[in-house]
Amino acid sequence: MDVVYSEDCALHDPPFELTRGVVKPYVESPARLESIKKFIDSQPSTFTITEPCDYSLTPILNVHKEDYLQFLHTIYEDWVDQGLPKNAVTGECFNHTNSFNKIDPEILKETALMTPSGRVGMYVFDLSIAFTSKTWLSTYTAAQIALTAAHKLLQLQKENEEKGKVAAIYGLCRPPGHHANCCVAGGYCFVNNAAVAVKFLQDYTLEEMNIMSKPLEFNPKDSITASGPKPKLSADKPKKKIMIVDVDYHHGNGTQDIFYDDSSVLYISLHGFPDYPFFSGSAKEIGRGEGQGYNINIPLDPKTTTDEIYLDHLTKVLEENQTVQEFNADIIVCSMGLDTWHEDPIAGMKGLKNVETYFKIGGLLKNSKSCKGRPVLFIQEGGYTIEKLGQLACRILQGFLE
Ligand code: Q9C
Ligand code: ZN
């Protein structure tokens, strides 16, 4: 299996975070990916590491607002230029829904954009977000990893057509993505890598991806402008149906939000509940308008969920759920968080203790009724038991390959 990876993802390395009243070293650290990479490297007969290409900002702009990306790109330098501390940019005052609520949103935004702290408060929702001088580089690289993995998935699907083999690619990236929506960062996430890959798979043909693909040469001084071809959505190009299976411990509020009104993307999440991000993840969130019915939340009690219970829920939704069966996805995207493991320092289901559970998760993504025969794109999300991550990731992928 191809694993798309870049060392540039390690450059985003904030010094600390503030969580529940405690200052501690940044949990979403470069060591996470380095640990997975080491494990992958130890199995050269199964995995091949490849570098990401560059598909420009255009496909990222299909998910995120331009002013938000401009903010991600410039906030660190703006902050330093104002004489603020160089170690990291963090939030100070957030634009809470129920504060400042009598002010006209246009006027509020005009005021907020005047200061770095105002901008952070506009575009960030929690204290897990910290910007360093390299945050945009790692964030951009992570998105390009997801795009490269999506491109390779379609290439491999084409190559495999006659062989009767199912394509799968792993995008090994950080920062993670599933808590970020079109215009707000949070939960260690800046750009929603999985969502960017989903839109790319829907909006571009393999031929268009071939044309767009350039060597990745990042220059931090580059202004951020869209430069790739805009997708042409014609009637003769039926929209691919994509099912996202989010197995990160946390609810992917960002991904849910991005596709909430969309019936061409079915979002399924299994997550600890109630827990971070505290405002979403209820089974009552079912999608809206056209998208109603195409959002499936499976909240699980972190204290009582065992390996068996977890697998039972995943099996039921992928084998028996009527919406899922009728959806009949063309492609599966797995938001592959590894923080369900019982020893995870910030998350974890108490009863999820068997590594073979991860192998079985991979097996379900290969053989369950709703996944069978469909290409699968694995995108790395959370997971914080540094020494364990390689093993957990590889068990999922091997469960798929078996
Ligand atoms: N004690 C991902 O796994 N801090 N994000 C929560 C709980 C933020 C997790 C601290 C957790 C975000 C991608
Ligand atoms: Zn998580």
Image: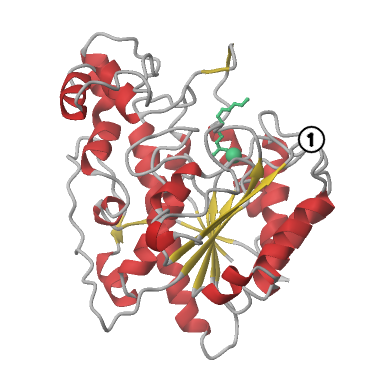
> 306 or 86: nearer the eye?
306
Furthest residue in direction bottom, as rendered: 162
Here the colouring is secondary structure
Residue kind at label 1, given as amino acid type: Lys
The percent coordinates of residue 274 (x first, y second) are 65, 34
The residue shown at (37%, 26%) is 97
Q: Is residue 91 left or right of residue 360?
A: left
In the picture provided, is 87 more to the left or to the right than 344? left
Name the residue at 72% across, 64% down: 316
The one nearer the camera, 10 or 146, is 146
Q: Quadrant of residue 189?
A: top left
Give the vertical position of 294 relative to 126 (above or below): below
| Residue marked by disc 1 | 303
Examine the rendering and report whether any part of residue 146 can be seen: yes
Q: Residue at x 31, y 70 (%)?
A: 204
Q: Is mark 1 within 8 Å of ligand 1?
A: no
Nearest the viewer among 31 and 183 is 183
Relative to 130, 48 lies left or right: right
Quadrant of the rendered structure where residue 206 is?
A: bottom left
* Quarter occupied by the N terminus: bottom right
**Quarter of the image with the C terminus in it:** bottom right
How many neighbours does mark 1 have within 10 angstroms: few (below 14), some (14-19), or many (20 or more)? Answer: some
Could you say where residue 26 lies in the image, as x and y percent from the top left?
Answer: 54, 24
Would you place residue 62 above or below residue 366 in this image?
above
Residue 148 visible somewhere in the drawing? no
Q: Position of residue 64 (x, y in %)?
A: 30, 46
Q: Secondary structure at mark 1?
A: loop
